[in-house]
Amino acid sequence: MTTRNPPDSSARTVIEGCHIVTMDDDRVEHATGHVVVEGNRIAAVGTGSAPAYPDAHIVNGSGCLLTPGLVNTHHHLYQWVTRGQAVDGTLFEWLTTLYPVWAHIDERSVGVSAQASLTWLARTGCTTSSDHHYVFPRGGGDLLAAEIDAARTVGLRFHPCRGAMDLGESDGGLPPDSVVEDHDAALAATEAAIDRWHDPSPDAMVRIAVAPCSPFSVTPELMREAADLARRRGVLLHTHLAETTDEESYCRERFGRSSLDYAADLGWLGDDVWFAHAIHLDDAGVKRVGESRTGVAHCPSSNARLGAGIARTRELRDVGARVGLGVDGAASNEAASLLEEVRHAVLFARARGGPQALTVRDGLEMATRGGAAVLGRLGEIGSIEVGKLADLVLWRLDTLPHAGIDDPVAALVLGAPPPLELLLVDGRPVVERDRVVTVDEDTVARQAAAVSAALLRSS
Ligand SMILES: [Zn+2]
């Protein structure tokens, strides 16, 4: 397994001359400011130049915007190699096209796909990513290990969610029986993943969550026992919920309730739970999610690509829900760029609710401190403050696409994706001058194309 040494605690990097959006509690911004990084933590933030440090590595940030690293709260990394399928289908049509392809994934394809997904996430400003992996074909090998190894190689902070499906077609579920797991085996594998990889320490690079897939692919028993397991072990819970009207019809027919009421009755509400999507909530549902401090991973591009609808982000934020952004799997969001989710979150909220629905700073907040709150890590990441981990993005805004836009946050959120001058995770550079430095992007692209072709041929 590839690992990198922790940064030397005496190593000091100074980034100065840039606009800084701290996203701290007071939302302080510095028009021209500096940040000092020591080891893997932020040691100073302020206006103007930093004090002179004779031994520091100096990064000239003029023409750039410094923000906290973006936090991706929902993804399926293995889907990078199955992009471009069922491009005009509904969620259920898209899933039934892809399940037979996914039945052939293995350690090699998942490792290559995860590396490609994470490399592109880094290039689009992401420093922490979750992943929701729920397809474990028999004989596929150690898929979670493959993606954790990929995250270590690329250098992102990583929250893999051990998913599962135990409700196959023959029992009234949507997935074919060949891709579902035995209930007890899935729970045992999930607990083994917690034992092996979950790191509760404050600067953890890997944390595990418990994540049965969705109401139409998981039995109520597994949902309930997964919640019990997560609470017994002190880890978070994640699932898909209220993504489409088809799902709502399924829940009403099968369980006599909305998807949210069904989940709530199984113990799935609270500040240790986050749902991907949460689109089809009525007013009472929005209130229930907010009052319980449940989290939401809003994935606007995927939702629009599948014609599923758009979450009520303004209302959810207003009632106290923790709302972050997610790319969702690359097979339903071929662009797979977290920065694009910020733009789409703002645009779609306004298309639904008018120009005041979300500000550009609201969008950036959801992608940074909002995502950190969803993953239970707001004490460590999500803002630029002394003592927090040095997960930072320096966006270059002085080239053709952005030069002349006065407000750098508007330039970042509404403009074209800018080049990255620097991306640090845990104080270490992952992107420099718009190239990922931990892996060779061209090699990653070639491997992903080869794996994709082989996988589509075998299905
Ligand atoms: Zn998803």
Image (cartoon, rainbow, N blue to C red):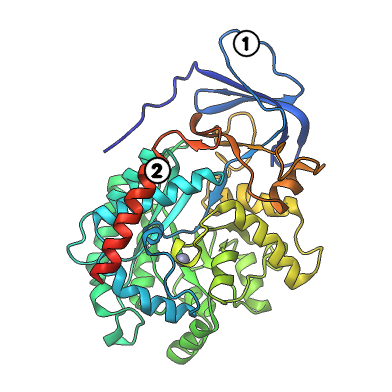
Q: Is residue 7 above or below residue 76?
A: above
Given contact means CB atoms under 8 Å apart, are the residues at marks 2 and 1 in contact? no
Quarter of the figure that contains the C terminus: bottom left
Few, some or many C-alpha atoms within 10 Å of disc 2 (few <14, some 14-19, many ≥20)? few
- Residue occupying image coordinates x 36% and y 39%: 153
- Check disc 1 and report its element: helix, strand or loop: loop
Q: Is residue 140 left or right of residue 316?
A: left
Q: Which residue is outermost to the bottom?
A: 253
Q: Is residue 270 visible to us here?
A: yes
Q: Is the residue indicated by label 2 positioned so its CB lies within 8 Å of ligand 1? A: no
Query: Residue 178: x percent and y percent?
Result: 23, 75
Q: What residue do we see at 73% from left, 72% from top?
A: 352
Above or below, 271 relative to 8: below
Residue 231 in view: no
Q: Nearer the viewer, mark 2 or mark 1?
A: 2
What's the amino acid at mark 1? Tyr
Q: CA distance from mark 2 to mark 1?
A: 37 Å
Which disc is residue 184 wearing? none
Name the quarter where the N terminus is drawn.
top left
The percent position of residue 3, horizontal first and vertical second, equals 32, 33
- Which of these two is toward me, 224 or 68? 68
Residue at 34% x, 76% y: name it: 221
Q: Quadrant of residue 311?
A: bottom right
Residue on which disc 1 sits: 53
Front one among 66 and 292: 66
Which residue is more in the foreground, 334 or 15? 334
Q: Earlier in the sequence, mark 2 or mark 1?
A: 1
What amino acid is found at the position of numbered circle 2 in the picture? Asp
Q: Which residue is mark 2?
A: 442
Q: Position of residue 194 (x, y in %)?
A: 32, 51
Quarter of image, res 453: bottom left
Please tell me whether mark 2 sits on a helix, a strand or a loop.
helix
